[in-house]
Amino acid sequence: MDAIVKDDRIELRRTDDEKKALVQRLNRIEGQVRGLKTMIEDNRHCQDEVQQIAAATAALREVALLIIAQHTEQSLQVAMRPEDRDLAMNDITQLLRSAMRICD
């Protein structure tokens, strides 16, 4: 993975393997959501439906944490360059602000 500074933001350039791992996680989550839809159509017990929602939500949070970790790692490398330190710290702060909304 590599990062570049573009338009006052840090953009990641993930490897194909990194992209594949994220997409695989998202495909599993997509399956969970399809399963939830089927459960609702089949009038399954509400507790089962809520459990499926909790599982999908937790899986999405894990994807978010992985993305945050990747971005933070690369941003810290950018921050090692004195001319980009403020930009990198601002970028990390903005990312964490967005992440905090996930937990609300």
Image (cartoon, helix red, strand yellow):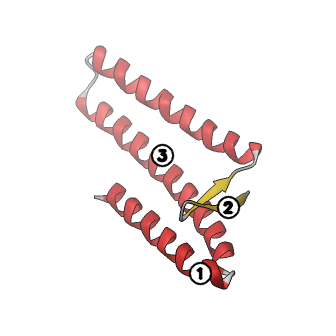
Task: Decide which of 38, 84 is in the foreground and name it.
Answer: 84
Residue for badge 2:
4
Residue for badge 3:
59
Mark 2 or mark 1: which comes first in sequence?
2
Q: CA distance from mark 2 to mark 3?
A: 28 Å
Q: Amino acid at mark 3?
A: Ala
Q: Nearer the viewer, mark 2 or mark 3?
A: 2
Q: Is residue 5 above or below residue 38?
A: below
Q: Nearer the viewer, mark 3 or mark 1?
A: 1
Mark 3 or mark 1: which comes first in sequence?
3
Q: Which residue sits at x=36%, y=55%?
A: 102
Using a 10 Å C-alpha cutoff, classify the residue at mark 1 as few (fewer than 14 neighbours), some (14 to 19) or many (20 or more).
some
Q: CA distance from mark 2 to mark 1?
A: 13 Å
Q: Which residue sits at x=39%, y=60%?
A: 98
- The image quarter containing residue 44 is top left
Q: CA distance from mark 3 to mark 1?
A: 32 Å
Q: Amino acid at mark 2?
A: Ile
Return the x and y of residue 88 as percentages of the image width and height.
56, 73
Residue for badge 1:
85
Q: Which mark is residue 40?
A: none
Q: Which residue sits at x=55%, y=60%?
A: 7
